[in-house]
Amino acid sequence: MRTRAVVLYQSGNADQMVWEDVDLPKPIDSQVLVKHEFVGFNMVDTYHRSGIYPTPPKPCRLGTEGAGTVEEVGSKVTDFYVGDRVAYAGSGSGLGSYSYSRLMNANDLIKIPDWMDLEVAAAVLTKGRTVEYLFNRTHKLQKGDSILFNAAAGGVGQIAGQWAKSLGALAIGIVGSKDKEEFALNSGYKYVFNMRDHDIVHEVMAITDGKGVDVVYDSIGKTTWDISLASVRKLGLVVSFGSASGNPPLYDVAKDGVKNSAYIHRATMVNYMTSPEISRKSAESVFEMIKNGSVKLNLNMDYHLDDIVRVHKDAEARKTVGQIVMKV
């Protein structure tokens, strides 16, 4: 069997991604053949493509999130059947969601509830579970806490603002341009400031009576790191969970740490989703937040999977808002 897939021969810009016809073997043992109907985009995809994050030896595939239907199962698969609606996120089965069909390990798949649309499932597993572990496990966010969240209008940011509001936390959002402010305000943030027109640290200190926020969540990296360090309270927490603008600069413990003795943590999904059971429990938490209305998604469905080069370029230029879901 053959299918279409994106292949990366060398790290670099978005134009390094090329479409090819590739072989697709029949599933064996615990493998499942999934026909994609929707594929989610995540900024981590650009890190894999550009070389910020490692990939398997090249040429390699790309993409970490998708949803579709089971077409065939291996002989040892007992939890999935032909026709089941499934989704996945993460690279447990290796990169490769930028394809029309692919083989997956059964342990990496999650059955989609009957009430959930496939496009929602394709959009929410990476971003929603990112918020789940950020708010439940890097720090147990609770009523009365204050947070500063970078990229508040992005896919993760949109979920984070609503999730934080549902818990009774005070959420301050940072966006890259004025046109994204209203979008973030409608996503649960009490205050939103764009970096071009505002002194973010000054605004945060004004809101928190000069104390700083309890937790800063920074997915941007290089261009926001100094703001993050200056905005957190004494003994507060700064969580770095992405590098959209490049890796954060080196942290001088003696020089930078003395300012507020903040805790610095680098969070990655692979270290928080360490078993199928944990991954599925995290997904169930996300599904429940959607089902009870605490989190509503703003899907960006302007792209087809064939447009993946343009998707990467638009996302890196910060032209996109909401959760990007590509129809296959």
Image (tube, rainbow, N blue to C red):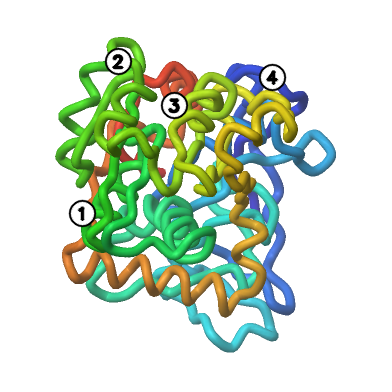
Residue 293 placement: quadrant: bottom left
Residue 5 placement: quadrant: top right
Q: Secondary structure at mark 2?
A: loop
Q: Mark 4: which amino acid?
A: Gly
Q: Earlier along the polypeptide chain: callout 3 or callout 2?
A: 2
Q: CA distance from mark 2 to mark 4?
A: 33 Å
Q: Nearer the viewer, mark 2 or mark 4?
A: 2
Kindly identify the residue that appears in the image at 27 percent across and 58 percent down.
Answer: 144
Q: Secondary structure at mark 3?
A: helix
Closer to us: 152 or 288: 152
Closer to us: 268 or 23: 268
The disc label shown at residue 311, or none:
3
Q: Earlier along the polypeptide chain: callout 2 or callout 4?
A: 4
**Residue assigned mark 1:** 296
Side of 253 where 34 appears, left or right: left
Q: CA distance from mark 2 to mark 1?
A: 28 Å
**Residue assigned mark 2:** 198
Q: Mark 1: which amino acid?
A: Lys
Q: Residue furthest top?
A: 197
- The image shows residue 163 at horizontal and vertical percentages of 29, 57
**Residue assigned mark 4:** 12
Q: Secondary structure at mark 1?
A: loop
Closer to us: 74 or 120: 120
Q: Nearer the viewer, mark 3 or mark 1?
A: 1
